[in-house]
Every structure is written in structure tokens, then in C-alpha cells.
Image: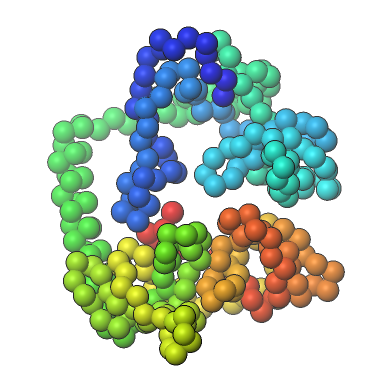
Amino acid sequence: MERAASTNDKRYVVQFTNLYQDRNIGTKLSKEYNSVDIRPLPPPQTPRKFKMGDIVEAYIDNGWYQGKIDQVVDNDRYIFRMSSMFLLFGMNQLRLHRTWLNGNWVPPLDESELDVEEEDSTEKMMEPETDNAEASKTGTGNILEESDQKTKEKEEEFSEGAHVEVTNIDGDGSNQAWFAATIVKPVGNNRYLIRFKTLRTEDDTGFLEKEMDSLHFRPPPPHIPVPDQFKMFDHVEVLYKGGWWKGVIAEVLPDDSKYLVILANYDKLECKHSDLRPRQSSIDEN
């Protein structure tokens, strides 16, 4: 988005939908902006074909990043270039770059997008209104009851000897991975002493133990069948450095049992089929 020359615009506090001040407790990020740095949501775009050199936006880490098509791989896959970074995306992960200028989108919306925009507006106008005070009163009670129930369930779930997976171990990017562990004992205030199953102490005399908050735990995911072959753009978890790391299949290598995976931190990793599992998320995640 281009900034206006004037600095006398009105300012607003906005709350992000998918960015968090603290993801572990669900606090969404809020920030103050000039009105010139805010624009309406662009209307949904139907998938379209692009050509080399097109200026587009790619959906990365909960936001749309501007770049250009560096190479057309086939009918629905493209190499997206952003600065010195090259990433492979499918057609559904890209949209045409547009600028909001003087109350209009540039380049202009085509007829099909205008139809979508009008339909969205009509649906919003037809949504039934509720009594705010009554809804607030009822909603508060439900939220408290659900919160108490979840707290009780977590206390039972994370009892001594329970098997869990743990993330965000050192605040160093390990929040992109899950590590198997066992609850040794509770230590109070929703904190537990845990023992990892794959991480060892520096002197290699045993498995690493660490005190952590239960906000970083989840139950082990249920066993689901691993497909005989993963395909391009599948979201997976990769067994790497003792943990299961989030990633996306970027390429199926020629022998069909190895894959090139782009991790959530954009590192590329060649891995075997046996080191992959489908990505799974608990309800409290994301």
C-alpha cells in the first residue's frame, strides 16, 4: 500500500484477524495506523492464469505479499519471486496485485468480481440483527462456562505420566515444530516438568527435562493413515532434529519416495516418505 504525502490523516486502532500479540493465550495484535494505510478488503478473486512478469500477491504466513511471476511451471503452478526469495505456488494461492487509489481499485475490477462484491454486500445487509445487550449477557455466561470446562479438561489431560507434544521450547523458532514428551509432574500455575522423548541433555546422559507452561502442550495427534504418496502443495509435518516441523511439499523427486519440502521458516529440506506425516492441528491452534 502506498503512503500519502500528508501526515494529518485520521488515525485508527485496528485489530488483526490472523496476527497475535500472544498466540498462546489468543490475544490478537492491535496497532494504530493512519487512515492512508488502511484500505477495504479486495473482493474475492476467482482463480486465474498468470504469465511471466505479472505483478501478483502470494498468501504467506497469514498475509498477502507482493511479488511477481518469475516462471510459469505449468497451467496452475508458478515460481513467485519476492526480493531474492523464490517460492513455488499454486494458482489458488495467488491473486492479482491491486492498489486502492482515490476510492477505486487499480487495475479496475472486472464484471465477475463486481458481481461477487455486490452479492457479499447483499448477504451482509440481510443478516438478522440481535439485541446487543442480551447477546452480550448470554454470551458472557457461555464463554465462562466453556472456559471453565476447557480448564478442567486440560488439567485431566495433562496429568502425571501423560504423553504430550510440546512446541515453542526456547522461543527460537521451535514453535514451528512439535516434540514428543511425557509429563513428569505438575509444579503449579499450569506449569509442568516434562521429559522429552527425542531431545537429550548436553552431556548426553539422559533425556532433557524442562519446566513449561501447558499453553505449549497438545495431546499426541491421533494416528491417521499416511498416504502411499504425497503430492505437490500437501501440508505435512517432517521429522527433523527430533521434532515434527511444519512444511509444504514443494516437489516430488524422481524416485517417488523422496520429496523437497519447504519448512515454515522457508528452509528447504529433502526428506524420505517415512519422515513425513499429514499436518494435524488441535482446536486451540491457529
Which residue does the image show at 32% across and 63% down from the upper left?
A: 215
Q: Is residue 187 above or below residue 96?
A: below
* Whether residue 49 can be seen here: no
Which residue does the image show at 40% across and 10% down from the upper left?
A: 8
Query: In the rendering, at what x and y percent does residue 182 appear?
Result: 37, 82
Q: Report the quarter where the N terminus lies.
A: top right
212 lies left or right of 179: left
Which residue does the image show at 54% across and 40% down from the upper left?
A: 63
Query: In the rendering, at what x and y percent does residue 158 appear?
Result: 29, 76
Q: Quadrant of residue 246?
A: bottom right
Residues 205 and 116: in front is 205
Q: Report the quarter where the C terminus lies.
A: bottom left
Query: In the rendering, at what x and y percent does residue 6 appear?
Result: 48, 9
Q: Quadrant of residue 262?
A: bottom right
Q: Quadrant of residue 217?
A: bottom left
Which residue does the image show at 80% across and 40% down from the upper left?
A: 70
Residues 235 and 29: in front is 29
Number of marks in the image? 0
244 lies left or right of 188: right
Q: How is the image coloured?
A: rainbow
Query: In the rendering, at what x and y percent does residue 230 appear?
Result: 70, 68
284 lies left or right of 103: left
Residues 157 and 33: in front is 33
Residue that extends furthest to the bottom in the rendered view of this protein? 205
* Whether residue 4 can be seen here: yes
Q: Is residue 180 above or below residue 96?
A: below
Residue that extends furthest to the front in the rendered view of this protein? 203
